[in-house]
Amino acid sequence: MKESVAVANVRCSGCAATITKALEAEGFTSVEVDLTCEPRIVTADVGDEARSALFKSILRGLGYPLAEEQVSGLDAAGLKAKSFVSCAVGKFSTKSDE
């Protein structure tokens, strides 16, 4: 089963590369990050409800919470910092792949 979620903090192709790589490393397939809309949409074949929860957990762990999620103060700052690191990692990995 494919699932699409709107996520916050995704800014560029570096972010998309990090998300794609992390999800594929956990066995998710058909991973897509739509950078043409705001909030950004991440889609993957999740399989079942347990994998759906893992899908969302991985995104949050990278600093990309669900757009609908109510994130406050320090938690929001922490997630934003994680997303900057994830973005930088993604930018470096896409450059080294060229």
Image (cartoon, rainbow, N blue to C red):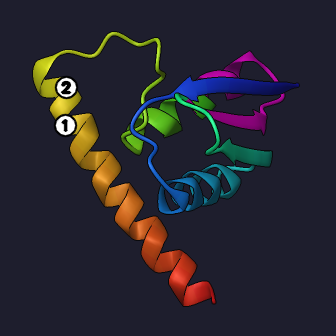
What amino acid type should be assigned to the residue bearing mark 1?
Gly
- Residue 27 vs 2, above or below: the answer is below
What amino acid type should be assigned to the residue bearing mark 2?
Asp
Q: Position of residue 71 (x, y in %)?
A: 27, 16
How busy is the neighbourhood of tag 2: few (under 14 within 10 Å), some, or many (20 plus)?
few
Q: Can residue 16 be seen in this snapshot? A: yes
Report the number of numbered marks: 2
- Say if mark 2 contacts mark 1, CB within 8 Å: yes
Q: Pick out the residue farthest to the left.
A: 74
Q: Which residue is mark 2?
A: 75
Q: Quadrant of the C terminus?
A: bottom right
The magenta-colored residue range is 40-54
Q: Is residue 51 left or right of residue 72?
A: right
Q: Can residue 28 be seen in this snapshot? A: no
Q: Position of residue 51 (x, y in %)?
A: 70, 28
Q: Which residue is mark 1?
A: 78
How busy is the neighbourhood of tag 1: few (under 14 within 10 Å), some, or many (20 plus)?
few
Q: Is residue 33 left or right of residue 57?
A: right
What residue is rendered at 40% in x and 59% in y? Answer: 87
Camera-side residue: 43 or 22?
43
- The answer to whether residue 41 is magenta is yes
Quadrant in which residue 4 is drawn: top right
What residue is rendered at 19% in x and 37% in y? Answer: 78
Q: Quadrant of the N terminus?
A: top right
Q: Pick out the residue farthest to the right.
A: 1
Q: Is residue 4 left or right of residue 10?
A: right
Camera-side residue: 39 or 70?
39
- The answer to whether residue 79 is magenta is no
Q: Position of residue 95 (x, y in %)?
A: 52, 84
C-alpha gap between disc 2 and disc 1: 5 Å
